[in-house]
Image: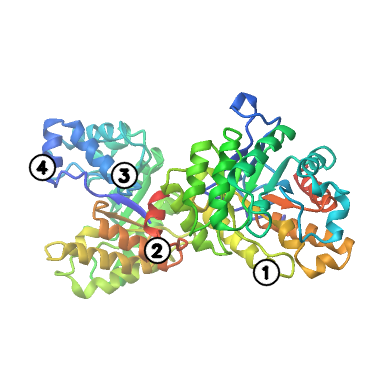
Amino acid sequence: MFIIGELINGMYSNISAAIKERNKKEIQKCALDQVACGADALDVNCGPASKQPLVDMPWLVESIQEVTDKPLCLDSSRPAVIEEGLRAARNKTIINSTTADVEKLDALIPLAKKYKSKLIGIAISAKGVPQNKDQRLELAATIVDNCQGQGFSIEDLYLDPIVLPVNVAQAQMKDILESISEFKIISEPGAKTILGLSNVSQGAHLRSLINRTFLTMAVAYGLDSAILDPKDKELIDTLITAELILNKNIYCDSYLEAYRKK
Amino acid sequence: METQLALEKWAGAISAITIGATKDEGGSRINTVKIGGQSSLPLLFKEGSIPNPPAIAFEVWDIPPQDWPEELTLPYGGVLNDPFAWADKCVNEFKAQLLCVRMQGAHPDFGNKGPDQSAKFISALLKKVKVPLIIVGSGDDTKDNLILPACSEAAKGERCLIGSAVQDNYKTYVASALADGHHIIAESPIDINIAKQLNILISDMGLSLERIVINPTIGALGYGLEYAYSIMERSRLAAFSGDKTLASPFICFVGQETWRTKEAKASLEQGIIWEIVTASSFIQSGADLLVMRHPAAAEKVSNFINAIFKK
């Protein structure tokens, strides 16, 4: 599993304050903490409170890559903000994200090509959130189609079926899970799959339990990557165990430790 | 249309381990032997780099071997009663690059030699021959826990490979390897899960994974060879996929396993062939270090290695 740490996000008060005060140390600590807990990449999001995301994004990127060379997942709904991040990045990058809307695809696919970045495509459009699996597949196919049309390698594409909170869209959970395996057969070679995990438990109690249960099920459906809280040790332990059961790693009594030695 | 080979690309590589230390490196060996370091399955030269061919170690005991059949003792022409002459013959006549010394004389049933005696033997052997050494115990855990630390200390700085550490008995050996600058053999009973676990236990004591050589335990041709073969193969696939806890070179005690089979003892020629086939099979499953007994078998396998590594 390719783990993308979600904690550098202006939505969190410590990060929002650090951005505002240009407190580099706080950002770097958050980056290194996540890497120590097993993050393979770091999500970077200025958050809704940022008044000047075009400046904040490159500052975050610069601050983080001073301490780690892990890939950075540049997270914004505005292509201009993402481009500022790409311009500043020396680390590998992942664009987070394009929707299935033409204007987004036309803006972000060329950027991904220009900066040799990977790209996350979310199965959503301006028309709204998909209501079932077929709609998800249709949106994902649109993204794949556009990438192929523009000569972007599908192996560098991550498709996200868009996770909804279980207390809002309980009836859709099974469709979301099934979309993971079906996204992979849209094209050959297939795209990778990704989830923004924490959304599943938004507004619910027992968030950690819901997160790790959903992640386990998603892993069984073939999930390749997730944006999550790597500091949730039980979540990571569960993930490692799920992958063990799927024979992705060789068992030994200290398999949790073995995984972390990797 | 031209057929194209599908080539696998791997993320991981096996640790490269150097056995023996020269004068410049704090030891007194005239040569060193490097094993491992490959990033491809055996013989698949196009899929990755295989910098070091498998190496052959000749087995030498501190006492005359009790259970070697005549077919095996014959080529040594009487030197088996004198370990130093035996070692010397392996190096000078059979051109051994390294020796595997078995401290069989420490076994309570075969001489019960003490730590001092064993240490003195290693010191004297190091003076007599100048190739790198692998030092293994007698097989009696209680006794080996006493003599191996003494042997390890006697060979301090020579960067030997010592063993064998097993899941229930590894701490003493690891401590010795750490103190005296040696590598360690980690032995598991044809069990990949235990091999992985033992590597973790050893590395938890502070001896890095890059200093471990796995003894997967093998069977000779006709005695479970395929089983060991498949364990080694699976272990390698995991290592190349990025599992560092299994990315260790393999040592295979080919001679020991071959010469206990009744087929090997049936006739001289058959014994030699048995050892050759067993050794060359394990080269194909990833053996990096072959501990062999019959010089004629070792020579043939050495030729085989040279032939396949001829660029």
Q: Find disc 1 in the rendering and name its residue.
A: B224
Residue B169 point in image, percent of width and height:
50, 56
Q: Find disc 4 in the rendering and name its residue.
A: A49
Q: Quarter of the image for the N terminus of chain A: give it.
A: bottom left
The residue closer to the viewer here, B181 or A212, is B181
- Judge if badges 2 and 1 mark residues of a common chain: no
Q: Which mark is residue A35?
A: 3
The answer for which chain carries disc 1 is: B
Disc 1 marks which amino acid? Gly
Element on which disc 2 rests: helix
Q: CA distance from mark 4 to mark 1?
A: 66 Å
Q: CA distance from mark 2 to mark 4?
A: 37 Å
Q: CA distance from mark 3 to mark 4?
A: 25 Å
In the image: residue B14, left or right of residue A221: right
The answer for which chain carries disc 3 is: A
Disc 3 marks which amino acid? Val
Q: Find disc 2 in the rendering and name its residue.
A: A243
